[in-house]
Amino acid sequence: MSDYKWKPIEPLTEADRAIDLSAIRPLYEAWRTSKRRLQDLSKQHLEEFNRRLVRRLSVETGILERLYDLDRGTTEALIAQGFAEDIVSHSSTNIAPAHLIDILRDQESAIHLVLDGVAKNRELTRGFLNQLHSVLTRHQETTAAVDQFDRRAEIPLARGKFKEHPNNPKRRDGSIHEYCPPIHVDAEIDRLLACYASYEDEDPILVASWLHHRFSQIHPYQDGNGRVARAIVTLQLLSHELLPLVVDRDLRTEYLDSLEKADSGDLSSLVGLFGRLESNAILQALSVDVDAAVSHQKSLTSAVIESLSEKFKRRKAIRDAELLGVNQIALSLREQARVTVAQRFSELRSATWAVGSSQTPKVENGGSDTNTSHWYKYQVIKTAQDAGKFANFSQDHYFTKGSISIGDERLVFVISFHHVGFELTGIMEATAFAQLESLDEYEDRDKFVEGFRPCSVEPFVFTYLTKPQDVEDAFLRWLDASLAVAFKEFGERL
């Protein structure tokens, strides 16, 4: 790999603006509407969800920077209970537990500074950036630097001040990634902030991706740049009534690869990653249970509710009818899925003809319109629970099923279209999974469940505001990737 040479940051390009975000854009407004309802019905539950999301972001941002290691069990305990030293054992991390808690609290404080900035409509300025950096590095005394003789040394970290020394990392292959030279940092930050201020009407995920990458290109501080970059992404998203996104440690490689592709002028991978993470955060927030809070609210205001009940019912019926329009989107996507799955299964049969005798593939649609909405309920609910979401089977459920037998092996591939969240939100997702079966085990229920394989890394999300023609290409790309996973798993059994 050759050296990466620094160059001044570029504004959003037409190629950036052409990145396909048609699938996620209807989710923004659907979430804003649902959030207002959640705040009315269960403010306490939503606030607790947000607290945990902030803690998770605080933990993962330091792990990405290799400031510390922390096992998953302790991570979940800290997220659930708060940042307390007595939760952390010496065996769960590679630094002193007290120091770990100090760093986590600094990172949590930075997010609260962002929240306060959003609440007060503070603009992103050089002063705000420096304030964020000071908070994030409060318990970091030193950092590594390289002198003019290419010698590494520990130097004091200037908190809240731009760098005075180059901070260009050397890769394993010996190549150098050059960030903005210290002498140009002031001008580049001014350019970044001026461009950002002009992007108010651009897509928020696109701008968040651009902002993160361009700030990373400048790398204005001696250390802590990644933490500041993710904090200002949170500022950008919250200012547009979206949720903070968490880049989990398991996504570190994809995250860094996406930033490298952006260095070469291709922002699409980073935009795609941020879009998936934002969708997932929204779907998890919609899975907050508000029943208890609703019941309590009714008991306190029963007289008012009784007097207005008929009015509320009429209004709710109109609103629900609008939200249920998402079912028509699901039916349209289901038909696209049926046609595509039938074509791909036919191609699979032709390609594997020599392996063994095969039956003609069978592809069918099912769901609430065919009295089969209960099919695959176990698999769908399990997949949703594993992702921290609630698949709502009290609403309509649809699916496309394809099956083929080759020799003694059978593949069943299913795309499920189901509502997300305890309440009707007008938001649905598609998930895909495969059932891999040996025919002589078909009647054995335990073996049937063991053959279950999720095939979609992320769900395909759509809302009552989605237009099928706008997301057709994105849906077919998602479906193609899911089918590829299923066929690969099936092929390994033949």
Image (cartoon, rainbow, N blue to C red):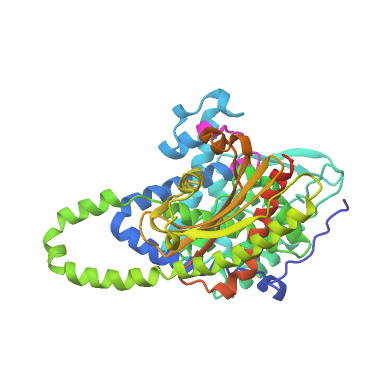
Of 28 and 380, nearer the camera is 380
Q: Is residue 218 visible?
A: no
Name the side, left or right, on which 86 lies relative to 36: right
Q: Nearer the viewer, residue 348 or 20?
A: 348
For residue 27, above or below residue 379? below
In the image, 165 versus 46, the foreground residue is 46
Work out whether residue 131 or residue 309 is closer to the camera in this orientation and state it: 309
The residue located at (71%, 73%) in the rendering is: 13
> Which x, y percent locates residue 352?
78, 50
At horizontal 66% and vertical 39% (from top left) the residue drawn is 66
Whole-percent x, y for residue 105 in the image: 49, 41
- Is residue 8 rendered to the left or right of residue 271? right
Count of residue discs: 0
Would you say residue 276 sits in the magenta stretch?
A: no
Q: Is residue 87 left or right of residue 230?
A: left
Q: Position of residue 120 (x, y in %)?
A: 42, 64
Is 67 a magenta residue? Answer: yes
Q: Which residues are magenta?
A: 62-74
